[in-house]
Image: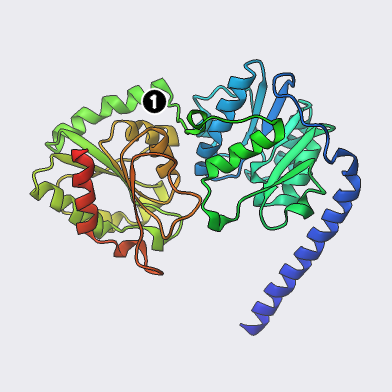
Amino acid sequence: MHTRRSQGRLKRKLLNIIRRIGIVFMAIAYKRFRNPPKPNLGSIHKVLIIPHDPIGDMVLTLPMLKVLRLRNPALRIGIVASRRNKDVLQAEAVDAVYDFYSPGIVRIFREILRARQEGWDVVLATAGFYKPTRFAFISRVVAGVGITATMNSARQKRYARIYSYCFLRPAPTDNVPMVDQYLSLVENVFNIEVSPEERIPEFHISPEIRNQITAEIPSLLLQHKASKYAVVNMEAKVPYREWGIENVNQLAERLRANGENTLLFLIASRNFLEYYAGELAKVSASNVAVFETETIQHVAALISGAEFVISPDTAIVHIASALIKKMIVFYPAPDEWLPYDRTSIILYPERREPISTISVDTVFSHIQSLLRS
């Protein structure tokens, strides 16, 4: 065990050395691209956005598309996506989509070269504070002689040497919403001001998928003798952030006993549903049903018709927020990923306790408040 930990430390040190060498090399090679004149958004032709990989990040990036399109309707907008988050863009007016995330070095290299052929005027790497060195290199390759920009809180001055602009990102402890952080990059690069109305995320659902989901709901409600439904997301990034199947079962029993004619649709990934199939089969409440969805668009269509949504900190929170749904959401502590400017009740467990310790009584009382509001 001691040897394994030593090897891990050595590997991290080597990677850090390689990263520092890369930064020095790029700082020299990219010197002529530093601090160029700020571009005029109304007169440039092409902007590429490179968000981080998770679905939630893509949802919170959507206001950037809206602001850019409003300021310059003729602008060609490109965005980098992955297999898991590209469906967020299905009903968006995006001109070009590239995948720098899915496996395969050769495939990624081809995608980067394909993006470079566009000749982007500005590349906005909102993913730059996750992997700043990697995205500095990718951004410059894609931008050619164009402008590259990102933000960083820990080493902003260091990364300002390898991007055209690297703006100061708020510290995570400041709890500045990620939507505002992403839009601040647009504001700083183009010297514009984004209004409060423009900051609100919106999620556009494919009409075909919306119609498909809407057609499925009535028979399920009839089968469970319910007149309305709510959506409960069972899955979080890590297990200690999940509220738990037993808590959901008890909540459903409380709702039924209280005369609430509400069906709870449980959603989760296919892997989650398969892994917990045995536990889910033991759910005794008659007003609970698992609703399997094909894509995030199907999930959004289901959420759009719900009375309320219950979810731990995941992309579901941001989708429900963008769809203006009432929510009860579980977070370990306040942070920059809270739902943006929506009617939601945010519940936190006692410090260092898992989400599952939040009581059914607490959630039930908040549901009653939501249904009355």
Establish if 372 lies above or below 197: below
Establish if 352 lies above or below 226: below
How is the structure coloured here? rainbow
The residue at the point 24 percent across, 30 percent down is: 217
Place residue 57 in its image quadrant.
Answer: top right
Closest to the observer, 71 or 109: 71
Where residue 148 appears, as percent x and y from the top left, is: 76, 38
Where residue 283 appears, as percent x and y from the top left, is: 20, 54
Residue 285: in sight, yes or no?
no
Q: Is residue 240 left or right of residue 30?
A: left
Residue flagged by tag 1: what amino acid is it?
A: Ile
Where residue 297 appears, as percent x and y from the top left, is: 43, 32
- Mark 1 highlights which residue? 209
Establish if 326 lies above or below 70: below
User: Dividing the image into 4 quarters, which one contains the N terminus?
Assistant: bottom right
User: Dividing the image into 4 quarters, which one contains the C terminus?
Assistant: top left
Where residue 325 appears, as percent x and y from the top left, is: 33, 36
Q: Is residue 87 left or right of residue 111?
A: left
Q: Secondary structure at mark 1?
A: helix
Place residue 327 in its image quadrant.
Answer: top left
Residue 222: in sight, yes or no?
yes
Q: Tell me the crowding category of disc 1: few under 14, some 14 to 19, or many 20 or more residues within 10 angstroms, Cα based.
A: some
Closest to the observer, 369 or 249: 369
The residue at the point 79 percent across, 45 percent down is: 137
Single out the residue that lies furthest toward the top: 74
The residue at the point 30 percent across, 65 percent down is: 357
